[in-house]
Image (spheres, rainbow, N blue to C red):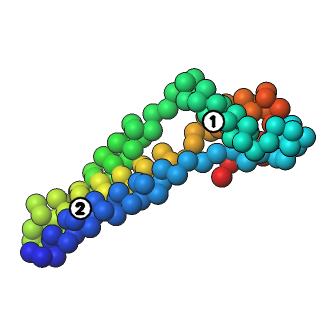
Amino acid sequence: MRMGKTVTFSIPLIVAAIFLGGCASQGPVLYPNAYLKKVGEEQAQRDVADCKRLADEYVRSNEGAQVAKSTAAGGAGGAVVGTAVGAVTGDIGRGAGVGAVAGAAGGLVRGVSKASQPDPVYKSFVNKCLRDKGYEPIGWK
């Protein structure tokens, strides 16, 4: 019994840690051209934030749907594997349940990881906005 409680408490903590780590926002890296040197780093950061805000308004994102889809797919795949393991061990129901939970957790982690990466259209929007202001974005970190 004690092992089951440890697993029950450990999985949400691990998923939360991965989720919070995946939320670190990526942003554009600016080439130190004459305009950046003229306006300074503080103004550049305000302009980046402004361009990101505009991108949030104009570029629709379906990150939540992607995370849910990945979680569901992981749960279904895990249930299939768990059922097979359960058939061998003699407890199909328990095997399917454990497999579904493990698969859903894996799918959730994959979905959150993918959602933490900015959409290519979002990046393009921000980059164009910055170029229009005089900056030269060279990549994202």
Label 2 environment density (alpha carbons within 10 Å; few <14, some 14–19, many ≥20)? many
Is residue 92 placed above or below 62 in the rendered structure?
below
* Residue 13 in picture, x, y percent from top left: 30, 62
Is residue 23 placed above or below 35 in the rendered structure?
below
Cα distance, mark 1 to mark 2? Answer: 42 Å
Residue at image location 41% in from the left, 59% down from the top? 18
* Residue 86 in picture, x, y percent from top left: 15, 67
114 vs 126, left or right, is left
Name of the residue lying farthest toward the top:
58
* Residue to which mark 2 is pinned: 99
Residue closest to the eye, 1 or 74: 1
* Residue to which mark 1 is pinned: 49
Q: Quadrant of residue 97?
A: bottom left
The secondary structure type at the circle numbered 2 is helix
Residue at image location 41% in from the left, 54% down from the top? 19
| Amino acid type, mark 1 | Ala
* Residue 51 in picture, x, y percent from top left: 66, 31
User: Pointer 1 and pointer 2: residues touching (CB < 8 Å)?
Assistant: no
| Amino acid type, mark 2 | Gly
Mark positioned earlier in the residue sequence (1 or 2)? 1
